[in-house]
Amino acid sequence: MTRNRKLLLISPRATFFGRNPGHQQFKRDSREFQFFDYTWTGFATGLMIVGSLTPQHYDIRYIDENIEPVDFDADADLVALTGMTAQADRMYEIAAEFRARGVPVVAGGLHANLIPGEVAQHVDAVCVGEAEALWPQVLRDFERNELKPVYRQRGRADLTAMPRPRYELAQQRYYPSIWVETSRGCPHTCRFCAATIRYRDKLGHKSVDQVIDEVRFVRERWDNPYILFSDDNFVVDRARTRELLRRLIPLGIKWSGQSDVSFYKDPDILELMHESGCMMMLIGFESVSTETLDGIDERNWKLRSMAKYIEAVKVIQDHGIGVYGAFTLGLDTDTKDSFAATSEFVKDNYLAGIQVSCVTPFPGTPLRQDMEREGRILPDRPWSYYTVFDAVYQPKNMTPEELEEGTLSVYRSFYNREFSLRKTRHFKAIYKNLVKKQVEREAALATSGRSMV
């Protein structure tokens, strides 16, 4: 009887809030920041997809090295690695250990898509593209002992034809949130963003039925799961979003997602998001400076949207949906005054949470090309520093150390007891008003019903 082949799916460890001791100390001291950081922590979704594309004659084990160590002497026939740029150095170390033991290693994910030539030097095969389009071929070649050095995608994967990710592979470990993907891609091509450049040139969607099936599957296997929709831009297709939100309402879940700011203009979307259990949306504001936003994306969409930032935050949060603002500091027009301006914006508008990062020249991005041409990449910063909280290049108007300290100053200004108490009072008033509106709505419906009898 032929034994099942053994496949290890490994997500390498990384220091995700930066290597700066000041950042790490702040993280240890701030309970509120810990809550937000903890909530947005999840498993490697790409490896769950790889698991779903693997035939039943494989025994699969998922290892998250941020939770458990890798056993390099484990019984394995094939290892699949994925990771962001901050995980790349460790990914290479893991690959070297297994290859020294005669176990072939395949790498995919964001970093492998950005610089496949470098990654290919450390593994037996590198996948450039979406797993759905490449993994079946990788396995066929592996079983023939004919792995190719590079697999490149031809055409886009049809997400509506894909199986449900193997969420159960991560079920043995505790995750505060469960990532679910409903779409892939983003209409905004920001110069510093690596995620939207390499995977596909056009937005792709799963069907609403697929998404609902996945949410139900997760709800049945986790106790009270908090769903994080991993889409780069959750609310792009408004008609589809409305249908999805309506279908989510009966499931009674709590969830968060990521989007640009434009959905604030759609009252139906806002009402449905609140009714379906949306607690928070991460919105990439990037900057509060018109100079900095000018040219940050190909169509200057974010610059044109900036005038509505204050209105948008109020409208969204008045619907009971917290705004988790993302800001990228250190671009060429930023100065040391940019940190105070960012702090003022996030506090004056009572954002629910913030993510403030150092702009990072990821490989493969237009920003990286500019920095390399100008000789501004710091040579002593390996990939493990590409956490978005460590400065890895020479800013124009400050030192790298001042950039790191400036981003940390925004966190300290926002995540502290005094402001947290003010913010709590602000949101209590919003929720009190929402309850009042709901009572009035129900009373109006009851009155309308009686008058019809």
Image: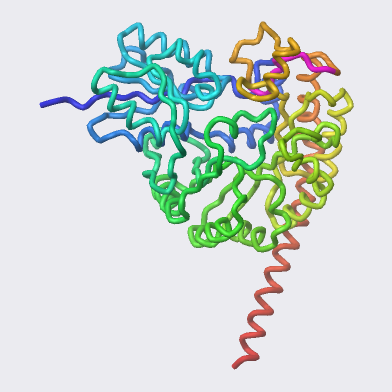
Magenta segment includes 164: no
Decide which of 370, 227 is in the foreground and name it: 370
Which residue, as the protein is rendered here, is positioned at the far front? 154
* Segment tinted magenta in the rendering: 387-396
Numbered marks: total:
0
The reply, left or right, for residue 354 in relation to residue 81 is right
User: Picture coordinates of residue 202 (x, y %)?
Assistant: 55, 42
Residue 76 in view of the camera: no
Residue 332 in view of the camera: yes
* Residue at image point 71% right, 50% down: 262
- Give above or below for 348 relative to 375: below
Which residue, as the protein is rendered here, is positioned at the far right? 337
User: Picture coordinates of residue 159 (x, y %)?
Assistant: 44, 45
Quarter of the image with the C terminus is bottom right
The reply, left or right, for residue 148 in relation to residue 285 is left
**Quarter-wise, where is residue 186 in the image?**
top right
* Residue at image point 28% right, 27% down: 140
The reply, left or right, for residue 297 in relation to residue 337 is left
Quarter of the image with the N terminus is top left
Which residue, as the protein is rendered here, is positioned at the far left? 1
The reply, left or right, for residue 287 in relation to residue 275 is right
* Residue at image point 52% right, 33% down: 199
* Residue at image point 62% right, 91% down: 452
**Quarter-wise, where is residue 333 in the image?**
top right
Decide which of 289, 125 is in the foreground and name it: 125
- Give above or below for 322 relative to 390: below
Decide which of 245, 151 is in the foreground and name it: 151
Chief secondary structure of the magenta portion: loop
Q: Which colour assignment does the render follow?
A: rainbow
Magenta segment includes 389: yes
